[in-house]
Amino acid sequence: MEIKLAKTAGFCFGVERAVDLTLKTLEKEEKVYTWGPVVHNEAVIGDLKEKGAVVFDPEDDINTIPEGSAVVLRAHGVTRALEESLQNRGLKVVDAVCPFVKKIHLIVKKHSDDGEFIVITGDENHPEVQGIIGWVNGDYAVIVSEEEEELRKIPEDRKICLVSQTTFQLNKFKKIVAKIKEKNYNAYIADTVCSATRERQEESAAIAREADVMLVIGSKTSSNSQKLYHICKEQCSHTYFIQSQEDLKQSWFLDVKCVGITAGASTPKKIFKEVQNHVREF
């Protein structure tokens, strides 16, 4: 049985940076909180908790965090108001926000300050999109497709600035951009789909096209992992979403000649290797 492994699988730059910053903070500070899960992977969060990190629920009262504590901002980003509130409380803010996400914050702030209508492609309930919204000074809309009902959220008489959640599906973003150009909106378009996301999606789709069985490893709470699953499923009907080797079933691999394996941006290399080694045993 041939096994095709995605070279882009595992931690992306932003996730690795966030985890490293959290670990370094744990070495220096007595009390370390993360603002929500610093990344979307239960195994990673479990490891950080064992080392002393406390995952703070964003729904809880910020005043319950002891003064002088270190607070690590998650990779997905937070609102401008929250950053200021944490600093005003005398907390040691550790900025682990992915630099690509920070770039989007600066774009929407500048263009909304200039009076433009901000359009964000992505999941409105995702922490990254919620963070982006928090940097908009004015009107905005979040859209998920190029359908007419979605586009009606965008005013035709305003200059617009279009950005995207970094892990948004690239093909969907391209369709939205094409539709906006077709409708002749006065638009500034910032392609903020992360290059790592782009490469991962393209490589995973290519592997899935050649595989009899495709495995996507990631957390159920991971947006980019879920998108990878749907992309691969379009190319290979026998695509399975798993979180670890424990989810594998031998029946999936009966009379299978080629298995493809990829993983989301917050999946540790350790889990990726464990899965591939376990598949080789079948």
Image (spheres, rainbow, N blue to C red):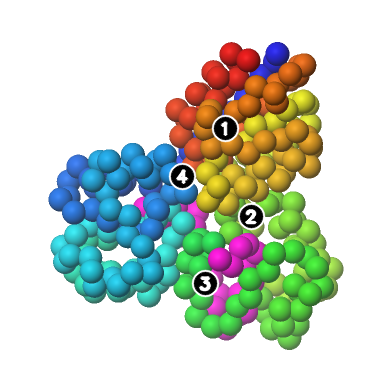
Q: Mark yes or no: residue 145 visible.
A: yes
Q: Amino acid at mark 1?
A: Asp
User: Mark 4 or mark 3: which comes first in sequence?
Assistant: 4
The residue indicated by pointer 2 is 168
Asked if the residues shown at circle 4 and circle 3 are in contact, with their CB atoms under 8 angstroms apart, the answer is no
Comparing 173 with 276, the one in front is 276
Q: Is residue 194 visible?
A: no
What's the residue at 19%, 60% (across, down)? 69
Camera-side mark, 4 or 2: 4
Secondary structure type for disc 4: loop
Q: Is the residue 239 above or below the residue 121 in the image?
A: above
Residue bearing the label numbered 3: 133
Rounded to the nearest whole Å, what is the CA distance between mark 2 and mark 1?
Answer: 26 Å
At a point 62% along the width and 47% down the height, the residue shown is 226
Q: Which residue is mark 1?
A: 247
Q: CA distance from mark 3 to mark 2?
A: 16 Å
Residue behind mark 4: 41
The amino acid sitting under disc 2 is Phe
Looking at the rendering, the stretch of residues picked out in magenta corresponds to 96-125
Q: Residues within 10 Å of mark 1 (few under 14, many from 20)?
A: few
Q: Nearer the viewer, mark 2 or mark 1?
A: 1
